[in-house]
Amino acid sequence: MKLLIKLYVTLFKIGMFSFGGGLAMIPFIKKEIVDSNHWIDFSTFKDIIGISQMTPGPIAINAATFVGFKVSGIMGSIFATLGVVSFSFILVSIATHYIMKFKESKILKSAMLGMRPAVIGLITSAFLLLAKSSYTLKDIKSIILGVIIGVLSFKTKIHPILIIIISAVLGIFFYGIF
């Protein structure tokens, strides 16, 4: 039971201090899950991020569910998942009550403007963390593949599912044939 509570509290903390969505949460999730608690290793963490990007649902919830299961089975999944969503649920419940009262608040607007660059920084940090440890910076084929997919993603309106399929085909071509 102690481990389940630790899972809940750790994931609650991640949910509480992670603004900006799943990608912005990656550095914080890594610090808590891999570095501080050693529940999984970094290689498994990278796999979770990859799988979370391909499966429905937010990265934080998918990661929490996986880590919880790895650490303490189904009950671990339940406690970890509830932990990561609890703060958001509480915050949204409270915010909906007061949103109209403070929607024109200069302090609130200023705080939101201040958080935007931080979110971009956290997303950039997540990108660099994953890129640094993957084959992307070590293999010319991966660099070429990354550039092609990056340009397609940024310059076209190709659906993300099609991007994943194109990546798989290019992966087969680059790594399977040559």
Image (spheres, grey):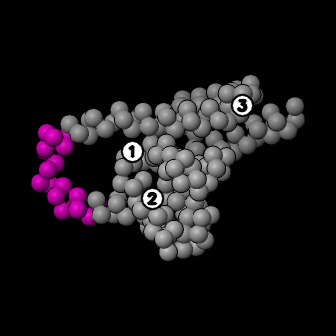
User: Does the stretch in magenta take in 3?
Assistant: no
Residue 168 is situated, as x and y percent measured from the top left of the image, at 73, 43
Q: Nearer the viewer, residue 70 or 108?
A: 70
The correct choice, above or below, for 153 with respect to 18 in the image is: above
User: Does the stretch in magenta take in 106?
Assistant: yes
Q: Residue at x 40, y 60 (%)?
A: 12
Please name which of the two marks, 1 or 2, marks the residue nearer to the observer: 2
Q: Residue at x 23, y 62 (%)?
A: 94
The correct choice, above or below, for 123 with respect to 55 in the image is: above
In screen coordinates, is 73 left or right of 141? Answer: left
> Which span is picked out in magenta?
92-109
Q: Is residue 137 in view?
A: yes
Q: Earlier in the sequence, mark 3 or mark 1?
A: 1
Q: Residue at x 53, y 54 (%)?
A: 37
The residue that label 1 is drawn on is 20
Residue 176 placement: quadrant: top right
**Which disc is residue 142 wearing?**
3
Residue 16 placement: quadrant: bottom left
Residue 53 is situated, as x and y percent measured from the top left of the image, at 58, 49
Q: Residue type at mark 3? A: Ser
Position of the C terminus, as image quadrant, is top right
Majority secondary structure of magenta residues: helix
In screen coordinates, is 66 left or right of 91? Answer: right
Q: Earlier in the sequence, mark 3 or mark 2?
A: 2
The residue that label 2 is drawn on is 11
The correct choice, above or below, for 153 with respect to 55 in the image is: above
- Helix, strand or loop for disc 1: loop
